[in-house]
Image: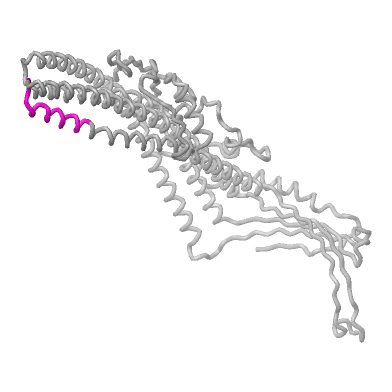
Amino acid sequence: MNEQLRPRVSGPRHTALLRLAPLSLCIALVACTVGPDFNRPDVPANAGYSKENLTATAQADIATGGAAQRLVAGMDIPGQWWTLFRSPALNALVEEALRANPDVSAAQAALRQANELVYADQASLFPSVNANASKTREKISGVQTGTPSSPILTVSSASLSVSYAPDVFGGTRRQIESSTAQAEYERFQLEATYLTLTANVVNTAIGLASVRDQVAATEEIIRLQSGQLDLLQAQRRLGAIGDTDVLTQQTALAQTRATLPPLQKQLAQTRNQLMAYLGRFPNQDRGEAFNLASLHLPEELPVSLPSAIVEQRPDVRSAQAQLHQASANIGVAVANQLPQFSITGSLGSTAASGTKLFSSGTGVWSLAGSIAQPIFDAGALEHRKRAAVAAYDESAARYRGTVVTAFQDVANALRALEADADALNQQVVAQRSAQGNLDLVQAQFKLGAVAYINLLTAQQTYQNTVLSRVKAQAARYSDTTALFQALGGGWWNRTDVDPATTGKPDRFGLPAWQEIMPAKTAAKLN
């Protein structure tokens, strides 16, 4: 249905356009907002990290990586949690990665894009104003005018046109809510990128230190075995032993040396991975050195309350934003099924000469209002609404899955802290026992009290315990990193955020979507 007033020529400049403002305000004041209002789903009351009570303190031996760690319930997480390892070299690497990593730059650009799209959607709440100007020369047929000559007419015109679509049923506001939720999603995707990157850099540095210590331990074992081989060869020259013992030691030495190239390969690949996190090429390695002894385990570790996990984890907040967007899209789909209103108007001047524009008697204006109601579309709008509802159900299921995974990550990290502390204890005991046994067997072998095979077995046992102890030490550092990552990484306490990548204040000073559409009914997760 359309209702339109014909353009009229007036004398004084008309104020019809000014009358649109009260009309638009009245429509906006009585406007409603269709579709569901969003509320974040609640965490189940019985959600927790473990059926059993968690050990409050994880403690290993006094060896590297054996410091006691106390779990503190409700302890806040520093924004730069990696500084708790007290390694300036590690801090420098993380800071470089945050500046130079391409994934961070991409996530920042995605957030800026989402913010701009919010601004674009917010503009739909306001009228659009356009300026128009034209000059036309036209020859009219004499048949039309009934005269033998064909006059040439010149018409100049200038006008301002205004168009406005009142948001009667809230479809535009729901679209703004949807795009705002998308911007929120991109914001927490950026936080997730920060968290993943920092955790990866720390874990890679720990892995690098672990492999380097394994290489050093293997090289020391090779040195000891080479010395043992020299001793056996000297004894053979004296006729004290036969070739069998020498050949056996040569075999053992070759086998130990064979374990070194894989470790060196792993060391090189780990360094290449670290270079990638830092945004460098492999040939830009500056030789930053790490070893486990340069890292310190934090003495206190946070354990966030289960109810806080959904606030702290960027992946949960991203899933929540997607659920929010899906909820708003239902409102958009419902609004599209309802009448659409529009108001247009223009005010200007038309004259035979441009110099006479806006002179007395040349003014023109028009005002039109329209309502459009879909009548038949073969069910397209209804199916789009159903699709929006299905998309909400999908997002709700994904949100539940993300929350479950978040609790799983925390539970795994807490259990690993306890188990790997115990494992390091046992590995240190095993290494000390193997060292004592090796010393004893070496002394007995020099006295001829034991066969060489006993010495070889003791050497191999000691070698295995050294490497296992190094891996157990690295595991404790990795477990600490995993816990900070599982708890969200303290992004809410970070002060190193680039203002260009955070959410910006509303461009038009509009109220937040929560103020426009106060929550009424909480969304439920069954």
Q: Is residue 21 left or right of residue 102?
A: right
Q: Is any part of residue 395 visible from this angle? A: yes
Q: Quadrant of the C terminus?
A: top left
| Front residue of 453 and 74 | 453
Q: How many marks?
A: 0
| Front residue of 437 and 316 | 437
Numbered range of the magenta stretch: 240-256
- Residue 120 in the image: state x and y as whole percent: 63, 47
| Front residue of 222 and 336 | 222
Residue 245 forms part of the magenta stretch: yes
- Residue 355 in the image: state x and y as whole percent: 93, 61
Q: Residue at x 89, y 82 (%)?
A: 150
Q: Is residue 452 above or below residue 513?
A: above
| Residue 252 picture quarter | top left
Q: Is residue 140 left or right of residue 256?
A: right
Q: Is residue 142 left or right of residue 380?
A: right
Q: Is any part of residue 40 visible from this angle? A: no
Q: Residue at x 14, y 21 (%)?
A: 234
- Residue 203 in the image: state x and y as whole percent: 38, 30
- Residue 160 in the image: state x and y as whole percent: 80, 56
Q: Is residue 443 above or below residue 483?
A: above
Residue 399 forms part of the magenta stretch: no
| Front residue of 29 and 154 | 154
Q: Residue at x 34, y 26 (%)?
A: 479
Q: Magenta-highlighted stretch: main secondary structure?
A: helix
Q: How is the image coloured?
A: one colour
State the residue lying farthest toward the front: 238
